[in-house]
Amino acid sequence: MNQHRNALYALLGSVLAMFISIQPARAQHLKQNIKGSLEHDVYISQFGDFHVQVPVHPETGGAVRDEYGKRGDMEMEQVIFTDDFGGFYRIISLKSSMSIDQVMNTFGNVREKRTLQTERGRELRVINVEKNGSEISVTSFKPGEPAQTTRPDLVTANLVFEKHGRIYHLAAGAVVLGDHRPEDMFDRARKSLDALLQKFELVELENKTSK
């Protein structure tokens, strides 16, 4: 597990996770196995504070899993979308006394960091490399040698901002394959993050408490 996820989970304490590999388009099946819900290929978070068009496709092995955890006044929900070709998208919604700068400090192997002012307010943009962080494995074969299975590195483009009393972290990944360097994948990860952001929408909640 990559450094950023380890650091964030350490801050949150023990989080009960449920991991599922299923086809996003099969809405009825997904509703029975995720804490959020899926309606017409739109994922709705368990707490109801955001929804997002599913960014992966069943034809390429698209899958979704989510999790929810709470410790004291700290609360986190997360959804991850993947596919069989290394597609990776993550959305975290965090209710905490942490600032977005403190969240920034949980990232490891940061290659690029920017602070922007947008319609969402102040936001942080980060490119980092998660060593062996891909959710796919690659097996290579050479004559006369045992097969070698490795888990490639994952470049992630990240966006962190605060809205409606919660911190939101959106991430999109690009797998580093073959002779490519991590730097070769920065632009692809950025474009995937921009595409995810176009599919993402916040919902302002009124007087709603956590489950």
Image (cartoon, grey):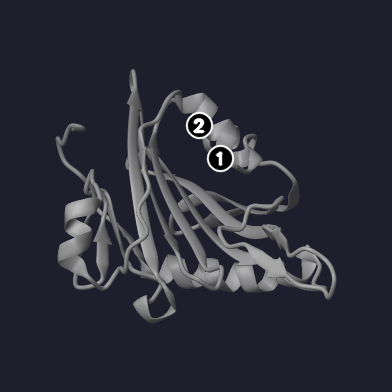
Taking the image as shown, residue 28 lies to the left or right of residue 137, namely left
SS of the residue at dot 1? helix
Residue tagged 1:
5
**Quarter occupied by residue 159:** bottom right
For the residues bearing labels 1 and 2, Cβ distance under 8 angstroms: yes
Kindly report the distance in space between the C-alpha atoms of the residues bearing marks 1 and 2: 6 Å
Q: Is residue 15 visible?
A: yes
Nearer-the-camera pick, 210 or 21: 21
| Quadrant into which the C terminus falls | top left
Nearer-the-camera pick, 200 or 91: 91
Q: Position of residue 148 (x, y in %)?
A: 74, 62
Residue at image position (74%, 70%) is 140
Residue at the far bottom: name it.
59
Relative height, residue 112 to residue 99 (above, below):
below
Taking the image as shown, residue 146 lies to the left or right of residue 81, namely right
Q: Position of residue 66 (x, y in %)?
A: 34, 49
CA neighbours of label 2 inside 10 A, class few (<14), some (14 to 19), many (20+):
some
Q: Which mark is residue 47?
A: none
Residue tagged 2:
9
Residue type of the residue flagged with mark 2: Tyr
Nearer-the-camera pick, 6 or 135: 135
Residue at the far front: name it.
144
